[in-house]
């Protein structure tokens, strides 16, 4: 139980409002003028030297966005966002169009990522400064600052680069797939993203290739009053396999910051995509001041037969989280999976879950969701399982557990289940429990302190999901869980 | 020495212990018998440090030191062990993980080094073999889906590992068949030593056939109303608690 002890030690070493990643990097940045109109969209597109078709695509999205209204059906509450009071583009000044090599990157930026524990210098990674070999794309505010292991990935035929670069180097792929899973018109925040997205990662794994290493994108919001609108597009061609992880942090600021990302995954015949998220945006202080609004659209399309997409998420950050990583199970016998740990403490609000849309025959899906609410937070699981008339033999298993710590928090479960054919089998299990006095007393009678006992019980509660994370990140996630729960005992 | 002096305890305005006085000496096995609702389980919880109970008067001394101010985990590290009547399930935490976390938490509190994994495994295996606990059981989540007998056996296994100075057994015989009762009793007997004391709480004489007590206390309405040798248990078996219940009224 080294990990439990370590987590408890970590918890003790920080005070209630401490958020380890809350520092600000002092770096000159270049910003678009505040506010949003067509000229902002043109500004961003011009910054990226985008071709005409890309600009048109953005403008089309922007025009549609203007006709839409912000949705209000989720179980979260926040003051109205003034979209004219935000910056939509911010880039470290010396970056220009992005660096050619790591040596072009501002040393201040490299130090920032070092502080965050993200090594960007391959030689350091290779020299064994860190043990895991993971290719990283680092996105700072609106631009990608570095992508590691590009050469090695190239050898395998894997394309892993900032999406702004892919628009130029692989326009045929971007044109074909961008917006094909999350259409421009999908929803208010996705449409906004389509108009103003600045950067993000692009991955293409060719037929039959098993990506030789974990891919990872690390998002950092630094600038004040700046929204981050990243766009990620991952394509696994026939029989390909890729495992991808995203992480994110932001400085502590008193005002709220908007993060509206779009992630699109496409899996062709027999392909598999594993997408893991460790979301640790600044959650705001214990009174609910500041923190990130995390309004994200993530969707995977199992386009080919026997394809598989698996979402794993550990959500501990953000003032408000509003996201439903989903799977469209189009290909025959395709499979979707969703494993989630969502922890809320303080005044955090979480409304998260998934959608499994069974369109093809004999498609299967599995949902394991663990919600943990502490402090005065609210934690909602919202999930949809749907089987089309033609999706005969579809199967879903859902297990949705909530754990309450203390008596001022709330856990809610909102499932939508609909089968339009008679041969589908859907199972839904849900439990809500509290860490009982009996459990705490039992552990304490054996020698564990109340904090150690809580960490042990929570780690047990989320075990099924933690096992789904890539090894390198499971321990990290376990620590994060204890930190998020600090101050929830006693 | 474990000394309980004039202990008054209540929960939600209901008085449960009314001036209970009791001593367990090192090397001694003391049995407490009494009818349902006499406060036996409450006594075991209060000694172990459960928080829902309010001690309004009296003290509990472990080797002359009052432990009422200590949290349950601190009392555990000082050598108090409670074998639960209804052991608690902890889903997702394997039994092995739990055992190791407990043992090392106690060692840490006492300023001892954590046990290395090989040393720990050796200790667990020895205890498991003695109590007929299969290795497979240790890989399952703690107490989840265990039979009554398995749970009780695991309680005694934990006592083996943690080597307490005083073991309190709260109706460890309930729910056990004859074979399980024998195994559990043998385990407890193997732990008997001149430096270790036991407080055995039970309804029935049959446990005391296997774990032979040095002294038997009869408890009724939150007090010890009679103390005697092991023959007292036999007398209770024959005549029931009737005499003592009215006596205390």
Image (spheres, rainbow, N blue to C red):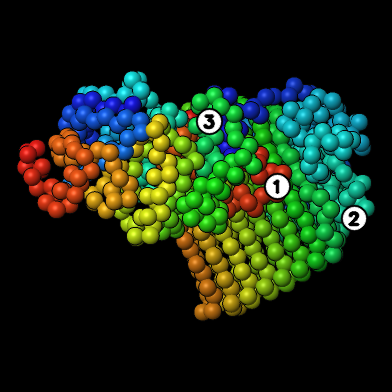
Q: What element carries label 3?
A: helix
The disc placed on residue A471 is 1
Question: Observer-nearest residue: A71 or A163?
Answer: A163
Residue B33 placement, left or right of A4: left
**Residue A428: x, y in percent?**
48, 63
**How far apart are labels 2 and 1 at the CA level?**
23 Å
**How far apart are labels 3 and 1 at the CA level?**
29 Å
Question: Observer-nearest residue: A190 or B83?
Answer: B83
Q: How crowded is mark 2: few (under 14 residues within 10 Å), some or many (20 or more)?
A: some
Which residue, given by chain and number where applicable, does mark 3 sit on?
A: B107
**Residue A425: x, y in percent?**
52, 73
Residue A56 appears anywhere in the view: no
Does label 3 lie on the same chain as label 2? no
Q: Are marks 2 and 1 in contact (CB under 8 Å)?
A: no
Which of the two marks, 2 or 1, is nearer to us in this view? 1
Disc 3 chain ID: B
- Is residue A99 positioned above or below B209 on the image? above
Q: What element carries label 2?
A: helix
Disc 2 chain ID: A
Which residue, given by chain and number where applicable, does mark 2 sit on?
A: A156
Residue at (66% x, 39% y) in the render: A476
Q: Which of marks 2 and 1 is nearer the N terminus?
A: 2
The disc placed on residue A278 is none
Residue at (19% x, 49% y) in the render: B234
Q: What element carries label 1?
A: helix
Q: Do the residues labelled 3 and 1 touch (CB within 8 Å)?
A: no
Which of the two marks, 2 or 3, is nearer to us in this view? 3
């Amino acid at each position: 139980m080294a990990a439990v002890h370590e987590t408890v030690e970590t918890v003790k070493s920080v005070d209630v409002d401490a958020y380890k990643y809350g520092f600000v990097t002092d770096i000159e940045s270049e910003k678009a003028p505040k506010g949003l109109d067509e000229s902002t969209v043109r500004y961003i597109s011009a910054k990226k030297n985008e071709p005409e078709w890309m600009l048109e695509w953005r403008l089309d999205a922007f025009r549609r966005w203007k006709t839409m209204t912000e949705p209000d059906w989720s179980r979260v509450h926040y003051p109205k966002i003034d979209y004219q009071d935000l910056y939509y583009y911010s880039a470290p000044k010396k970056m220009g169009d992005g660096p050619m090599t790591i040596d072009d990157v501002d040393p201040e930026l490299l130090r920032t990522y070092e502080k965050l524990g993200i090594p960007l210098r391959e030689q350091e990674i290779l020299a064994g400064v860190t043990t895991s070999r993971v290719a990283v794309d680092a996105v700072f505010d609106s631009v990608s600052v570095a992508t590691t292991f590009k050469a090695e990935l190239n050898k395998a035929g894997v394309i892993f680069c900032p999406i702004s670069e892919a628009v130029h180097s692989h326009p045929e792929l971007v044109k074909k797939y961008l917006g094909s899973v999350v259409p421009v018109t999908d929803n208010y925040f996705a449409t906004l993203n389509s108009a103003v997205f600045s950067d993000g990662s692009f991955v293409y794994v060719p037929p039959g290739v098993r990506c030789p290493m974990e891919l990872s994108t690390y998002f950092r919001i630094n600038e004040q009053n700046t929204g981050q609108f990243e766009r990620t597009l991952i394509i696994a061609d026939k029989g390909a396999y890729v495992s991808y992880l995203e992480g994110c942090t932001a400085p502590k600021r008193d005002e709220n910051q908007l993060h509206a990302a779009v992630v699109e995954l496409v899996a062709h015949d027999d392909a598999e995509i594993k997408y893991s998220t460790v979301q640790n945006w600044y959650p705001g202080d214990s009174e609910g001041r500041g923190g990130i609004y995390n309004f994200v659209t993530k969707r995977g399309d199992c386009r080919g037969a026997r394809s598989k997409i698996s979402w794993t998420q550990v959500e501990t950050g953000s003032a408000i989280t509003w996201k439903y990583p989903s799977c469209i199970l189009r290909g025959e016998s395709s499979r979707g999976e969703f494993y989630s740990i969502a922890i809320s403490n303080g005044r955090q609000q979480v409304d998260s879950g998934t959608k499994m849309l069974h369109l093809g025959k004999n498609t299967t899906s599995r949902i394991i969701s663990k919600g943990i609410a502490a402090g005065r937070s609210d934690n909602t699981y919202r999930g949809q399982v749907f089987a089309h008339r033609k999706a005969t033999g579809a199967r879903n298993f859902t297990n949705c557990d909530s754990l309450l710590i203390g008596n001022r928090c709330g856990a809610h479960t909102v499932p939508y289940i609909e089968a339009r054919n008679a041969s589908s089998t859907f199972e839904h299990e849900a439990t809500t429990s509290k860490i009982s006095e009996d459990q705490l007393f039992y552990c304490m009678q054996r020698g564990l302190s109340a904090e150690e006992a809580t960490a042990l019980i929570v780690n047990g509660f989320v075990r099924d999901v933690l096992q789904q994370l890539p090894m390198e990140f499971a321990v990290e996630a376990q620590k994060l869980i204890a930190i998020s729960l600090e101050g929830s005992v006693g | 020495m474990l000394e309980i002096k004039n202990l008054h305890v209540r929960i939600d305005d209901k008085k449960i212990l009314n001036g209970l006085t009791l001593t367990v000496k090192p090397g001694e096995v003391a049995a407490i018998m009494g009818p349902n609702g006499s406060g036996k389980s409450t006594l075991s919880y209060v000694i172990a440090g459960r928080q829902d109970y309010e001690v309004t008067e009296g003290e509990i001394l472990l080797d002359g030191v009052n432990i009422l101010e200590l949290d349950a985990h601190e009392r555990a590290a000082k050598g108090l062990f409670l074998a639960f009547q209804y052991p608690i399930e902890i889903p997702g935490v394997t039994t092995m993980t739990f055992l190791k976390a407990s043992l090392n938490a106690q060692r840490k509190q006492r300023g001892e080094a954590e046990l290395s994994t090989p040393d720990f495994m050796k200790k667990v295996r020895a205890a498991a073999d003695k109590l007929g606990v299969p290795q497979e059981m240790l890989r399952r989540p703690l107490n989840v889906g265990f039979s009554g007998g398995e749970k009780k056996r695991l309680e005694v296994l934990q006592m083996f590992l943690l080597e307490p100075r005083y073991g309190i057994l709260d109706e460890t015989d309930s729910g056990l068949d004859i074979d399980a009762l024998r195994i559990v009793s043998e385990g407890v007997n193997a732990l008997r030593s001149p430096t270790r004391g036991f407080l055995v709480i039970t309804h029935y004489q049959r446990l005391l056939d296997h774990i032979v007590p040095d002294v038997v206390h009869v408890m009724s309405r939150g007090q010890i109303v009679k103390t005697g040798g092991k023959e007292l248990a036999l007398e209770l078996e024959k005549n029931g608690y009737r005499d003592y219940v009215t006596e205390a009224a």
